Amino acid sequence: MNRRLLPYLLSAIVLSFLAAWSYLKDPSLERMGRSWQLLETREIQEISLIARDKEVHIKPLGQGLAWAEVQKPKAEKEMFLVGERLRDVMFHLSPIWSNRDLGKITAKKIRDYGFEENGKKLMISLPKQDPLILMVGTRGFRSDSYFTLDPSHKEIFLWDRTAVDLLSDPARMAIRSPVFFDPEALNRIEIRDMKVPERSLGLNKFQKVWRQGESVVAAEDPAIGFLEALSKVGIQGYRQAPLQGAEAVLSFLCDLETTLRVTLLYEKSADKYWLDLGGGYPQILLDRSQMDQVLGLWTSQKKS
């Protein structure tokens, strides 16, 4: 290297380092505001949003799954499973973040911030304590945050819109397929074949490797392929009333963060397949056009 260029090269390196350091230390790039309330999201039993046009109740099952219940005036109650985007709601609950503190409650703020006309009540149920209650008003002036009132502290703050917007329209969070069968999400699964018991099996995952007993189960094994395919079958609807006269085909014990007991049902008279998660919850209608191929993966495996 030409020695005459060395001082210039060293100067360029030093200036680049200082510029990067200045960027990283720029206070404007840090998150503004403060933590208003810290919640342990795994302990949340129910999240409710009550507005004039509807009530929404979210009942978490674990592993980013929950039942959503929507009740509108003079309409039947809707229930469906929500999934991945529920994590966005939980992210904004842990912690609940004040983008800006707006001070104590006054009659003018109650009126100007939309708590009287457009107010919504958010309730978060936790074990062994009173529900956390927040009142949500209108969007802040030229802001992506909602005016939010904390009755327990009698104060108002600005809160990011994400959680409230998703809870106001929970259909945006609905799962499109039974993702709880995805082998990536499972820790353990037991599958019982109601017609051919010899085909039943149990699989455990340790350090991302599936095993059946002491034997390693390869990623291309029909049982793993079956679970992957089943996790991608389209959900076409829900049935609120119990299904009568359906035949149980397979039963599953799925170990995620929580344990789900699921039964695959076949309704012969209508030629439809349903999933039943028990607990009096609605049954899930699966895309019939996909099921023959999916079940073929299951029956192609060797009997135990």
Image (tube, rainbow, N blue to C red):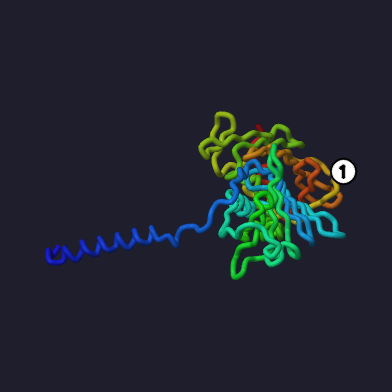
- Residue at x-position 83% and y-position 50%: 240
Residue beneath label 1, please? 245
Where residue 123 appears, as percent x and y from the top left, is 71, 50
Vertical position of residue 227 compared to residue 289: above or below: above
Q: Residues within 10 Å of mark 1 (few under 14, many from 20)?
A: few
- Residue at x-position 20% and y-position 61%: 10
Where residue 286 appears, as percent x and y from the top left, is 74, 52
- Residue at x-position 67% and y-position 58%: 105
Vertical position of residue 98 compared to residue 304: above or below: below
- Amino acid carrying label 1: it is Gly
Q: Most extreme residue toward the top, as rendered?
A: 214
Where residue 73 appears, as percent x and y from the top left, is 84, 59
Q: Most extreme residue toward the left, as rendered?
A: 3
Q: Nearer the viewer, residue 77 or 39?
A: 39
Left or right: 99, with 229 as reference point: left
Q: Nearer the viewer, residue 81 or 36?
A: 36
Element class at badge 1: loop
Left or right: 268, with 185 as reference point: right
Quarter of the image where the C terminus is located: top right
Left or right: 270, with 294 as reference point: right
Quarter of the image where the N terminus is located: bottom left
